[in-house]
Image: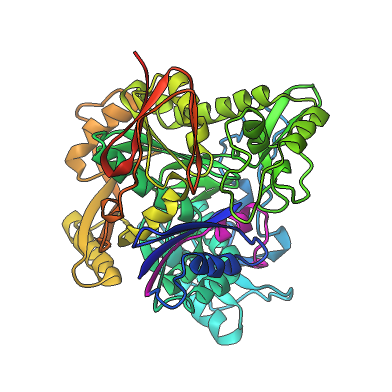
Amino acid sequence: MRIGIDSGGTFTDVVAADGRVAKVASTPDDPARAVERAIGAVDAADLVDVLAHGTTVATNALLERRGARVALIATRGFVDEIEIARQVRPSLYDPFVDRPVPIVPRRLRFEVSGRLDARGVEIETFDGLLPEIRAAVDAIAVCLLHSDVDPRHEHAVADALRKTRSELVVCSHEVSPEFREYERMVTTVVEAFLEPVCAPYLMQLAAFAPEALVMTSAGGLVPVAAGARLAASLLLSGPAGGVRAAAEIAAACGFADAVSFDMGGTSTDVCLIRGRTPEPTAERIVAGFPIRLPALDVHTVGAGGGSIARLDAGGALVVGPRSAGAVPGPVCYGRGGDEPTVTDADLVLGRIPVDAAFPDLGRLDVDAARRALERAGVTAEGVVRVVDAAMERAVRVVTVERGIDPRDLALVAFGGAGPLHACAIADALGMRAVIIPPRAGVCSAAGLLCAPKAREVVRSLTDGSLADALTAVEYEARALVGAGAVVQTAVDCRYVGQSHELTVPTPDDFAAEHERRNGHVRPGAPVEVIAVRARASIAAPLRIGDLPEIERRRVVGPAVVSEPDCTVWIPDGWNAQPRELGAWIVRRET
């Protein structure tokens, strides 16, 4: 049997190929324990042959700075690049804002000789001398100038280190062989920071199934051993599964363009879907660090069912990003939580039944939730309005701020809390409809179950034939996935002299995409290709539509519908119509 398991900050969800679903409480101290419990919850312990997994282990380790102790080796004169960073300010109008503290402290940054120019020509040889690293470290990151073009100096340094030291050695050309030195250095350091933490956990999963796979940020499944060797590629592991499921469900319901809206216990993840395809990105910011690896363009805000509500020093109501998480959880769970959360507010407002099917919980304590809100000096209505406003802004980031009119889109709402808040978000933005997928509370796990095996390869391009470079990355990507893989190629282009590039299928597509994204073109200006990409994939043996259909009926609001995996709130003046795959299409009545 094939199963998909999404390990979230509050709950761990499982969907089996025969349609069985379950939710269990996550175990942050040992995530593998929740995975094992999830398998048992669908009575599949002896039946699983393929496990498709999405994990938050890498994300949480980076956010909480619970990773390995890392040393950095860089080209002479460039060791402080990791701290100097870019001149972009994290908050334009806040003079007191601080950048994230670098993962590698100054005393653990070391220099070596040797230097290449931007085309890979050696202008100074590596003399073979390694720095003396006296402090105890768990991993050594090696990032030398222009190693994305020619890794010869990194090979020399890594070979020498591996002969004399036992620590993990991570080279930038193995992690992110792309243009831009600062981002490549940060990504390499993050990999060295995460790999010793994530690898042991991922390898535990191999005991649960003959074939254990993990989702990457780019939305493809890879063997857990491959994920362990590139832990930085797992920072959007769980959300990527939900985005893929949302795209397929929206298309089945007749919406090629949509926004996925995944509201869980600790955060909300949104992603633009255009032409049935989630928007990709070559880089994203996680915990303040630029991660230069292929990913789905998911925007995350700290707004979830477990987000804590409070009054700030100025008396304003603030919701999140701090969360009650799985332990102790919202006050109404009765597990020791004493700070009011969004879930407590929804319960007090009557949007969640007191006997809702929350895993490992009995009857929810509405009186305790009401008292907690009163102690904090906040109202349930105020908490919901504030968290809805935060999520509305998140949807605007992936639509309005990119020149996309949200009124042309559907909002695909899932996650344990998504169907409770989606109509308010859609109403504020004038969106066409809300789609509530079948099994909405475990939609990310369903997306993992039906996700393809896939790998991405990207290489910087300087001199040489574009056709030859594309052939090389296509061959490399196909070899990583295996026989039968379908390969798509793309290029990163820019006008000569531009500081940022766009990813397009071919250079001929650049002008149209530049006009769509930026509102103008430069006729006659030369265009250069700075990188080539290839994605190889093999489709999963089943799709979302192959799962048993969920029976749903027409619902007229105001109404609360309690399902086994989530609760749905249909406001007054809205109605839900059952559609393809058992999804609901929710619209305002006209």
Q: Is residue 58 magenta?
A: yes
Residue, x 23% and y 34% (percent of image)?
A: 254
Quadrant assignment, res 497: top left
**Residue 446 placement (x, y as % from top left):** 39, 54
Q: Observer-nearest residue: 220 or 289?
A: 220
Task: State the extent of the magenta-drawn residues as a range.
Answer: 49-70
Taking depth in this image into account, of 320 and 228 the one nearest to the observer is 320
Q: Is residue 120 visible?
A: no
Tell me which residue sits at (36%, 58%) in the image: 19
Vertical comparison of 281 with 477: above or below: above
Residue 191 or 340: which is nearer the viewer? Answer: 340
Query: Is there any visible trace of residue 334 in the rendered image?
Result: yes
Total marks placed = 0
Image height of 344 relative to 164, above or below? above
Answer left or right for 427 relative to 346: left
Name the image quarter holding the C terminus. top left
On the image, the x and y values in percent for residue 244 come to: 35, 48
Residue 15 relative to residue 344: left or right: left
Q: Is residue 174 magenta?
A: no
Front-lying residue, 404 or 420: 420
Decide if residue 171 is on the left or right side of residue 104. left
